Amino acid sequence: MEPRRIALIIPTCGRPDDLRECLRSVAAEDDGSLAQVIVVDDGAPEPVELPADVGGVPLVKRRNAVRRGAAYSRNLALQTLADEVDAVGFLDDDARLTQGWFAAARRELTRDRGAVTGPVLRFDRGLVSRARQLRYDRRYAPVEPGQPVAFLAGGNAVVWRDLLVKAGGFPDTPTMSDRFLVRRLEAAGGRCHFVPDLLVRHRNSKGLRTAVREAWRAGLLDDTPLDSPARRRLAGAARDALAGDQVAAALLNVALDAVYLGGRERARRHRARLAAAAT
C-alpha cells in the first residue's frame, strides 16, 4: 500500500523569497497526490503573505505570535491536517523539490516503513554551505538505497500520518528534533528509510553565527555514545581535512565539531553535578 494523499508542512520565518520559490517547486512537481499545504509563520516581525492555494491545492496558514521553532511549528500544523491526508511531508522554506519527488514518496513509503527521508543538495555558495554539504555527503556515503537509518531530514521527509500521531509528533527541542523523532517513530513501531530519489535542493548556509549556535546546541542535547574520545576524534578529522580536496570547508567542520564536543562536555558535567547532588 502506498499513500494516496500527502500533506506538506513548511515552517517559515522571515524568508519570503525562499518560501515563494519553495511553493513554486511544490506546484510544479505535484502529480495529483498533494492534498494540502500548511505553512506556519514562526513569529516573523512581518507576517508572511501567502496565496490561497498552491497549484490549485488548498494552502492553510498558521502563525505563532512569537518564535517557537521548527518542531513546535510542525506539531502545530499537525492539528490542521485534512481528513483525507494519510501521509505527511516536511520541507524547509528554503528547499526546492526536484523532479519525481512525489512519485518517490508514494513509491517508497510502504506500510512496512514508518518514514522515508532523502538527500539534501545545496544550491547556494560559500564556505559554510560547502562545509554543511560535506557533512551531508559523509552521512549519505555508507547508506544503501532503502536502508533503515537513524536520521531524518526535517526539511525532506515523509511520514505515515497514523504513526506520526502515535509517536506524538516532533520532540519540542531547539535543534535535533528530527533525529529525536526517529527514536519516537521506532518506539511507535516504524523505522525511517533512506531514499536517494527523494531529493531536495536547499540553501545550506544561514551564516557562520547560526552554524556555531546549532553546533553548540546539538552538543548540549546529543546523548548518543561517541565513536571515539573527543581529542582523538578532532585530531583524526583535522588530518582527514588537510588530506582532502576541500580543505577550508573540511577545517570549518573540524571547528564546528569542536564546538559541538564542547557542548557535549558541558552537558556531561551538568548531568554529573545533578547526579552528585542527588546522592
Image (spheres, rainbow, N blue to C red):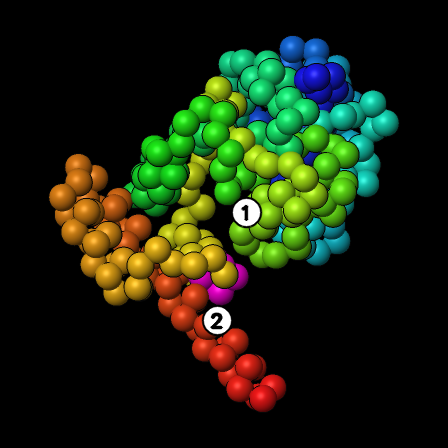
Instruction: Determine the secondary structure under disc 1.
Output: helix
Image location (x, y in percent) of residue 33: 70, 15
- Mark on residue 267? 2
Overall secondary structure of the magenta section: helix
Categorize mark 1 by other alpha carbons within 10 Å: few (<14), some (14-19), many (20+).
some
Which disc is residue 179 wearing? 1
At 63% from the left and 18% from the top, the residue drawn is: 106
Q: Quadrant of residue 249?
A: top left
Query: Looking at the image, do the residues carrying marks 1 and 2 touch, with CB atoms under 8 Å apart?
Result: no
Q: Residue at x 57, y 29 (%)?
A: 116
Q: Secondary structure at mark 2?
A: helix
Please tell me which residue lies in front, 166 or 28: 166
State left or right for residue 93 relative to residue 34: left
Report the magenta residues as a range.
Answer: 218-222
The residue lying at 76 percent from left, 41 percent from top is 165
- In the image, 139 versus 142, the foreground residue is 142
Query: For this view, does 90 lie left or right of residue 125?
Result: right
Residue 5 position, x and y percent, is 74, 19
Q: Position of residue 37 (x, y in %)?
A: 72, 28
Indicate the quadrant where residue 54 lies: top right
Residue 167 magenta: no
Distance from Cα at disc 1 to Cα at disc 2:
18 Å
